Image (spheres, grey):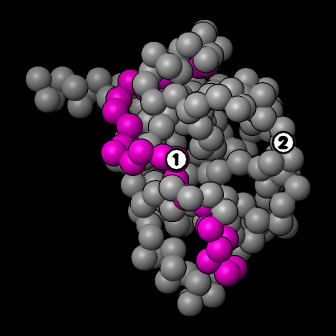
Amino acid sequence: MKQSALNSSHFHIRMAVHTMRYGGVIAYPTEAVYGLGCDPRNETAVHHLLELKQRPVSKGLILIAADFSQLQRYVIEPPPTRKSKLDQSWPGPVTWLIPARPETPRWLTGVHHTLAVRVTAHPLAATLCRIFGGPIVSTSANLAGYPPARTPLAVRRYFHRQLGHIIHDKTGSNRNPTEIRNLADGSLLRPA
């Protein structure tokens, strides 16, 4: 039975990766809630995700990754003292604002000079990033102003037939979406 469930998860991860590679938007479990995701390099996919969520591009988005190396094309490498903060909190439910590289698309950073990034602690989300071969967009699966979806059924209620794929699995044990901190000064922008 466990092998069957594992094969099912891998099938759904491969389907989600295929969907993202062809410009689609997916839903997948994260540390606390379901997330909407897509290929961060695909401007059309990102704008479609923002349209579905009814979120303005100016706010910026979060990227999740399996490890920090997947984020290096988007953010400036922090000095060792600040990098140690990342190492102490990752993988884990802390999203950090890090200065974005000048070439990082505005459809990811919005009006900011930083990018919100996280090395995810959710095993399925990390596997998704590994198989995809890079970071993916991660924003809560809900319409702006509504509670985040915590189950595949809630995702379907918000986005009936508008997503390319939904990965059915459990979210992590966190009760709230990840906290967001500014790496420059450690300030808390969104509590967990």
Of pointers 1 and 2, the one earlier in the residue sequence: 2
Task: Give residue 33's position: percent from left, percent from top.
Answer: 48, 37
- Residue under label 2: 57
Q: From the viewer's perspective, is residue 84 above or below residue 7?
A: below
Q: How many marks?
A: 2
Q: Residues within 10 Å of mark 1 (few under 14, many from 20)?
A: many
Task: Give residue 76's position: percent from left, percent from top.
Answer: 71, 74
State the residue at coordinates (54%, 66%).
69
Residue 77, picture quadrant: bottom right
Cα distance, mark 1 to mark 2? 20 Å
**Any part of residue 131 in sight:** no
Indicate left or right for 47 with 143 as reference: right
Kind of residue at badge 1 = Pro
**Any part of residue 98 in sight:** yes
Kind of residue at badge 2 = Val
Using the image as rendered, state which of residue 107 and residue 14 is in the foreground.
Answer: 107
- Residue under label 1: 177
Q: Residues within 10 Å of mark 2 (few under 14, many from 20)?
A: some
Assign the N terminus to one quadrant of the image. Answer: top left
User: Looking at the image, which residue sits at the far left?
Assistant: 1
- Please, what secondary structure does the residue beneath circle 1 have? loop
State the residue at coordinates (51%, 74%).
86
Quick check: marks 1 and 2 in contact, CB under 8 Å? no
State the residue at coordinates (45%, 21%).
152
Task: Give residue 146's position: percent from left, percent from top.
Answer: 65, 29
Indicate left or right for 2 with 96 as reference: left
User: Looking at the image, which residue sits at the far top?
Assistant: 161
The magenta segment is 163-188
Using the image as rendered, state which of residue 122 and residue 158 is in the foreground.
Answer: 158
Task: Give residue 127's position: percent from left, percent from top.
Answer: 39, 45
Main SS of the magenta part reads loop
- Please, what secondary structure does the residue beneath circle 2 have? helix
